[in-house]
Image (spheres, coloured by chain):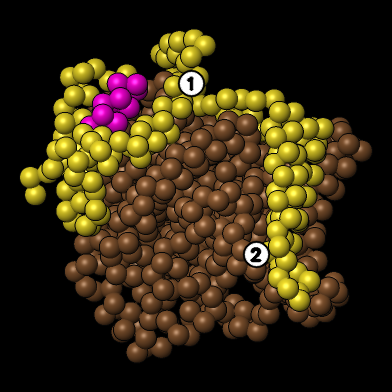
């Protein structure tokens, strides 16, 4: 997801301008010169200016390249497969969280959580021998801690817990 | 004073606090030792649990978990050359070189011992600095608060190990996030786009869980698994530590002081303290040529430094609600929820709670020595747990924890969204810590700013009229202009700049 500075900078310019405009059109408090519109206006302007500076590469010289700590000589890990879709794997965790939002009420906590655990674990390279028991047991453990001890109302759905 | 101290003892000597502290210590040690799971993430994931605890027990968990995690990050750093937390990254190479020389015990022992010493030095700074500063802060008006907040925000951008422009942009992003909702001077829905869930604004805690925990799981998806730890038998871990303390007492003190100063600065935390102290140790050492070959001196100074910063990070947090580092940012959220709203009056009205916090810090740092030694001995087994078994649990905790904050699915959506935001920002060199600071401080900055504007009736002069305000204003503007000056300086004298940056 490494994007050129010109892209992120331009995005910030647009976002800043939108924020400033959005603040500008807010209704003022009657009889008062400053209201809820001032702060977004200031921030939006600042953000847009920063965006412009980034587009023009100001401050780039300060950036330090991220130091990757290499593995011990001779046992360097094989480079991960770099397919076109490989980068999209990073979107899996947020996608699973959204899945939880959509499905938890219908399927219940245990089933949704088991699916999340299984998918995450498999995506990180676990064999089914690890992923399956993990998916079967960890939702119950979490439910015990949060649902039973901390009384978080987790949805029961299709499969209610024995407690 | 004595009465308050006894009250504080009474507050912390309940079973709830003791169990919470012990459990959080073990939790912090385990999370900190696992590569890729940082101390901040450990603290963020604790927050949902703290809802159900009493205020003191809630703070106890945060104090214990964060202190332990910072030390525990040294363990995989020394044994695998993979730092468990970013705060150990500065000296992971050095510690690993010592392990290869057969001095793993000495390196890890120095980690435990000087972390504990540093932590206690940090508490002392909190105890000494906070009350007199609270006296001063009582006379602050909104003008001072505005400049102070601005100064805090600017500090965060200055110390970021990234482009200051990007750091400032990150800070503005955070402030913009804090604009969402109806909690603004006019009480009108702002940037809510008609979505009811946004009326209450974005809660800082789910946002923090998102940028620190979910983003980390996202990164794990794309990075190879770290190698397993070779099993080894350890000799005595504390042997020789007292000798080191006597030999390197000056380095240790310097590390403590640097850690305290960096901890107090808003936005700069343990990782920055470790980097600065390690560099300083090398710079002033009598035998700099030994650095990098397994020399314990840098470990002493940096280990003393990063734990000192943890406690001193609470100074601005407790006094002004300005977080000293990202862990303190989370702590502030918890303080507000527990009715211990940060501010100078906290030290007069809730003095016993403050003493309880000091005591808990001291206890946590003492507890670190036995628990830390135990942890080092069993680390080989814990580090056997593959990432594919840990990350799914983290995911579940993110989902359930963020739901628990408001018993509301919108929290889970927030976590997912901020996971993506944090991931994209980090990948492109925008420091996430600056955004976090903006989110946490946004409401306060706006309140101070707008109230000051209303009071001054459109004039800019009152912002500088009061003496403290003028000093803070000068510092804030100086901090704002500093990167510009450095940038100009580098353009003018490119040769010197090259010499200065190559270290």
Q: How many marks?
A: 2
Q: Please tell me which residue is depicted at 33% across the width and 54% down the height of the picture.
A: B407
* Residue marked by disc 1: A88
Question: Residue B172 placed where, x, y %?
Answer: 67, 50
Q: Is residue B229 magenta?
A: no
Question: Residue A76 placed where, x, y %?
Answer: 44, 14
Of residues B23 and B395, the one drawn nearer to the viewer in this rendering? B395
Span highlighted in magenta in the image: A113-124
Q: Up-down: is B452 above or below B323?
A: below
The chain that appears brown in the image is B
Of residues B12 and B118, the one drawn nearer to the viewer in this rendering? B12
Dividing the picture into quadrants, the one containing residue B149 is bottom right
Which of the image's four quarters has the C terminus of chain B? top right
The chain that appears yellow in the image is A
Question: Residue B490 placed where, x, y %?
Answer: 85, 38
Q: Residues within 10 Å of mark 1 (few under 14, many from 20)?
A: few
Circles 2 and 1 in contact, beta carbons < 8 Å: no
* Residue marked by disc 2: B445
Q: Which residue in the rendered view is the most extreme toward the right?
A: B492
Dividing the picture into quadrants, the one containing residue B35 is top left
Q: Up-down: is B230 above or below B409?
A: above
Q: Circle 2 sits in a helix, a strand or a loop, which is it?
A: helix
The chain holding disc 2 is B
Question: Residue B196 placed where, x, y %?
Answer: 49, 54
Q: Please tell me which residue is depicted at 16% across the width and 37% down the height of the picture.
A: A158
Q: Up-down: is B225 above or below B87?
A: above
């Amino acid at each position: 997801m490494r994007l050129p500075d010109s892209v992120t900078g331009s995005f910030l310019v647009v976002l800043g301008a939108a924020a400033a405009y959005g603040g500008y059109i807010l209704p003022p408090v009657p009889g008062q010169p400053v209201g809820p519109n001032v702060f977004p206006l200031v921030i939006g302007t600042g953000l847009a200016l920063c965006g412009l500076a980034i587009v023009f590469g100001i401050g780039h010289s300060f950036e330090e390249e991220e130091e990757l700590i290499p593995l011990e000589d001779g046992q360097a890990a094989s480079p991960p497969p770099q397919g076109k879709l490989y980068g999209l794997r990073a979107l899996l965790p947020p996608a699973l969280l959204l899945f939880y939002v959509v499905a938890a009420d219908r399927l219940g906590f245990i089933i949704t959580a088991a699916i999340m655990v299984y998918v995450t674990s498999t995506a990180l390279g676990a064999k089914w021998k690890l992923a399956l028991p993990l998916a079967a047991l960890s939702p119950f453990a979490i439910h015990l801690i949060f649902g039973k001890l901390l009384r978080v109302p987790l949805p029961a759905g299709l499969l209610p817990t024995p407690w | 004073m004595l009465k308050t101290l006894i009250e504080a003892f009474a507050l912390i000597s309940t079973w709830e606090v003791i169990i919470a502290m012990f459990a959080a210590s073990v939790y912090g040690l385990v999370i900190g030792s696992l590569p890729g799971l940082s101390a901040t993430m450990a603290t963020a994931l604790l927050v949902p649990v703290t809802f159900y605890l009493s205020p003191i027990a809630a703070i106890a968990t945060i104090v214990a978990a964060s202190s332990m995690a910072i030390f525990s990050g040294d363990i995989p750093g020394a044994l695998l050359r993979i730092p468990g937390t970013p705060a150990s990254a500065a000296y992971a190479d050095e510690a690993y070189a010592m392990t290869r020389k057969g001095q793993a015990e000495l390196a890890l022992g120095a980690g435990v011992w000087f972390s504990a010493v540093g932590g206690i030095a940090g508490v002392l700074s909190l105890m000494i600095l906070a009350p007199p500063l609270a006296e001063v802060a009582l006379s602050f008006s909104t003008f001072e608060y505005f400049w102070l907040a601005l100064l805090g925000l600017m500090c965060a951008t200055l110390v970021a190990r990234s482009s200051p422009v990007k750091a400032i942009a990150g800070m503005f992003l955070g402030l913009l996030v804090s604009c969402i909702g109806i909690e603004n001077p006019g009480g009108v829905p702002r940037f809510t786009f008609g979505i009811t869930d946004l009326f209450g604004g974005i809660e800082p805690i789910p946002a923090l869980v998102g940028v620190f925990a979910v983003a980390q799981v996202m990164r794990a998806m794309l990075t190879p698994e770290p190698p397993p730890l070779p099993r080894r038998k350890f000799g005595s871990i504390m042997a020789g530590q007292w000798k080191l303390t006597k030999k390197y007492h000056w380095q240790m003190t310097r590390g403590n002081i640097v850690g305290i100063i960096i901890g107090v600065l808003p936005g700069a935390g343990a990782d920055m303290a470790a980097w600065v102290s390690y560099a300083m140790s090398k710079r002033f050492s009598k035998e700099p040529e030994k650095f990098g070959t397994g020399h314990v001196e840098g470990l002493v100074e940096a280990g003393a430094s990063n734990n000192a910063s943890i406690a001193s990070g609470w100074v601005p947090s407790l006094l002004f609600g300005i977080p000293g580092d990202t862990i303190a940012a989370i702590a502030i959220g918890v303080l507000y929820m527990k009715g211990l709203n940060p501010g100078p009056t906290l030290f007069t009205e809730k003095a016993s709670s403050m003493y309880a916090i000091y005591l808990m810090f001291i206890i946590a740092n003492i507890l670190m020595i036995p628990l830390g030694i135990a942890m080092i001995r069993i680390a080989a087994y814990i580090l056997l747990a593959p990432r594919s078994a840990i990350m799914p649990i983290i995911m579940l905790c993110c989902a359930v924890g963020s739901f628990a904050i408001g018993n509301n699915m919108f929290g889970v959506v927030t976590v997912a969204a901020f996971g993506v935001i944090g991931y994209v920002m980090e990948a492109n060199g925008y420091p996430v810590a600056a955004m976090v600071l903006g989110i946490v401080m946004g409401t306060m900055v706006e309140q101070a700013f707008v109230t000051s504007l209303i009071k001054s009736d459109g004039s800019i002069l009152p912002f500088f009229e009061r003496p403290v305000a003028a000093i803070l204003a000068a510092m804030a503007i100086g901090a704002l202009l500093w990167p510009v000056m450095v940038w100009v300086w580098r353009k003018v004298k490119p040769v010197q700049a090259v010499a200065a940056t190559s270290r």
